[in-house]
Image (cartoon, helix red, strand yellow):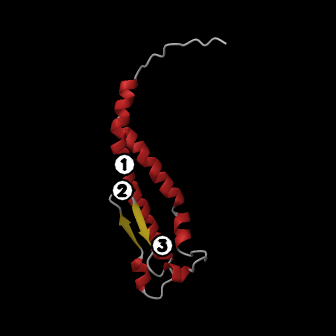
């Protein structure tokens, strides 16, 4: 068996590499905003869906932003008491499921916007 080596011509490599170097911080910036919007939509819907006896449980649901652009949705101290350890999670799971399509669309838009910004 004889293998022939061919010379590969690189065209556009420098421009592509330059664009990739620019896109990383741009994607991070857009994803940080998208993550925050996604978390806020989950919080808003969970606050509507939570069984209310007093406003304490509803007020405990909040979004906590991380330093790296991540978001933590805190459903409060009583989330396990209200839902139980293995219960169907009557306000968490529906909030996650109902916002799923919008969250995915927001993430796709963040990628598109980041690519457009560096072109």
Which residue is at the far front? Answer: 1
Q: Residue at x 57, y 75 (%)?
A: 89
What residue is shown at x 46% (from left), y 66% (from top)? 42
Q: Is residue 40 visible?
A: no
Which secondary structure, mark 2? loop
- Look at the numbered discs 1 and 3 and tell me whether their residues touch, using CB distance below 8 Å: no
Residue 73 x %, y % = 43, 68
Cα distance, mark 1 to mark 3? 27 Å
**Apparent side of residue 26 relative to residue 103 in the rendered image (left or right):** left
Question: For the residue labelled by badge 3, is the local secondary structure a helix, a strand or a loop?
Answer: helix
Q: Write down the quadrant of residue 65 in the picture.
A: bottom left
Relative depth, front residue between 45 and 86: 86
Q: Read off the residue under disc 2.
A: 69
Q: CA distance from mark 3 to mark 2?
A: 22 Å
Dot 1: few (<14), some (14–19), or many (≥20) neighbours within 10 Å? some
Q: Earlier in the sequence, mark 1 or mark 3?
A: 1
The disc placed on residue 46 is 3
- Look at discs 1 and 3 and give the one toward the viewer: 1
Q: In the rendered view, would you say 34 is above or below 21?
A: below
The picture quadrant where one finds residue 59 is bottom left
Residue displayed at 36% across by 67% down: 64
Q: Which x, y percent locates residue 46? A: 48, 72
Residue neighbourhood size for the residue with mark 2, other residues' Cα within 10 Å, grouped as few (<14), some (14–19), many (≥20): some
Q: What's the distance in space between the residues labelled 2 and 1, CA to CA?
A: 8 Å
Q: Are marks 3 and 2 in contact (CB under 8 Å)?
A: no
The answer to which of marks 3 and 2 sits earlier in the sequence is 3
């Amino acid at each position: 068996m004889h293998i022939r080596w061919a010379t590969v011509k690189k065209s556009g490599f420098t421009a592509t590499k330059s664009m990739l170097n620019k896109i990383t911080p741009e994607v991070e910036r857009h994803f940080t905003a998208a993550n925050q919007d996604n978390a806020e939509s989950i919080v808003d819907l969970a606050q509507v869906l939570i069984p209310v006896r007093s406003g304490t449980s509803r007020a405990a649901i909040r979004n906590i932003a991380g330093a790296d652009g991540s978001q933590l949705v805190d459903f409060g101290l009583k989330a396990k008491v209200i839902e139980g350890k293995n219960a169907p999670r009557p306000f968490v799971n529906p909030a996650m499921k109902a916002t799923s399509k919008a969250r995915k669309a927001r993430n796709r838009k963040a990628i598109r916007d980041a690519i457009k910004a560096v072109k």
